[in-house]
Amino acid sequence: MGSPTGPSGTPAPAGTTAETRLTPALTAGIPWPRWAVVTVAAVAAVLAASCLLCVLCCCCGRRTRGRKPRGKEAVGLARVRSTATPHLVSGHQHSVPSVPPAELPGATLLVHVRDFQRFSRHEPLGTLSLPLGTVDLQHVLELWLPLGPPGSDEAERTGELCFSLRYVPSSGRLTVVVLEARGLSPGLTEPYVKVQLMLDQRKWKKRRTSARGAAAAPYFNEAFTFHVPLGQVQSVDLVLAVWARGPRFRAEPVGKVVLGARASGQPLQHWADMLAHARRPVAQWHRLRPPSEVGQALAPEPRLRPPLPGS
């Protein structure tokens, strides 16, 4: 075989490869040197590859942001998602009623774990039952125990009530707006809400909404204003009670919510938020507690009578 020839038919230099006939045809109409054409083509190829890489990165980034982050550690709770990891759980010390040492072996510690919901009822996650007779209470213990299924709660069957609170310290105006209720028993008719203020464990002022028809989720949207001086706001209890007619065709209390200095849990937090954000309405949902339970909590403490002379 002979040596390759160039475009003009002359032999190509030794050690080179013959170019295809397409390359001269493509570059013949461009009045640039061949090295400039090759450089521009290389830069264009690099830019095209960079644009394609950016498009791929953006698509992958959007898919990644659309997905919920997965937790690194599983805690075994169905409702607690990737935001719950062991290092986010902090211990809290609470005072409990004193128990005689002789009764400890027969006592049981019951713990309810709930998912905090600021504007609704806390969702139960599980329960833990620990017989105190099975552990050594002479030392501080740190235990990991499995949670059981959520237990039944009587307060959850009584329904919920949503209302807002607003307090103006300068004028002493306490405004309560009863918004709506939900989760009431379908057999109840003509539900309404009583709003009552108690001062020093004594009934002080009260109002009530108008009755609604037979509905498990009545809507009220009625406002009531009470005059409570700033010096007395820490001494009052606010009681909201849902009343309705039951099978006996007479009005009976369905459930109650207590707010104020003697409240606890979410009602106490709602009262504190009202005082912290003066002149601004703060609305929340509250679970209704059984009337008997609230009545015992609000019962006035017995007063000691001084002994009569000569007795």
Image (cartoon, rainbow, N blue to C red):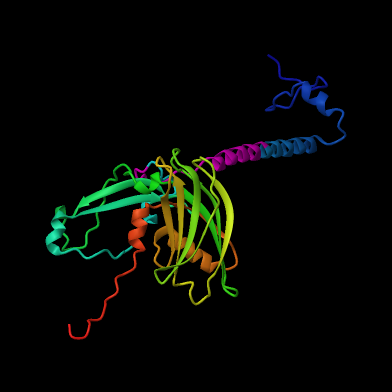
Q: Quadrant of the C terminus?
A: bottom left
- Residue 300: quarter of image: bottom left
Identity of the residue furthest to the top in this view: 1
Residue shown at the point (59%, 64%) measured from the top left: 280
Nearer to the camera, 289 or 81: 289
Nearer to the camera, 178 or 46: 178
Q: In this view, does 186 lie above or below 28?
A: below
From which residue to which does the magenta span run? 52-77
Residue shown at the point (63%, 38%) measured from the top left: 53
* Image location of residue 111, percent across then percent down: 29, 52
* Image location of residue 105, percent across then percent down: 13, 56
Q: Is residue 250 visible?
A: yes
Identity of the residue furthest to the left in this view: 102
The answer to whether 166 appears left or right of 72 in the picture is: right
Nearer to the camera, 43 or 35: 43
Q: Can residue 90 be seen in this view?
A: no
The answer to whether 78 appears left or right of 164 in the picture is: left
* Image location of residue 244, percent across then percent down: 46, 47
Q: Does the magenta stretch include residue 236?
A: no
Q: Does the magenta stretch include residue 62?
A: yes
Q: In which quarter of the image is the N terminus?
A: top right
Residue shown at the point (60%, 74%) measured from the top left: 171
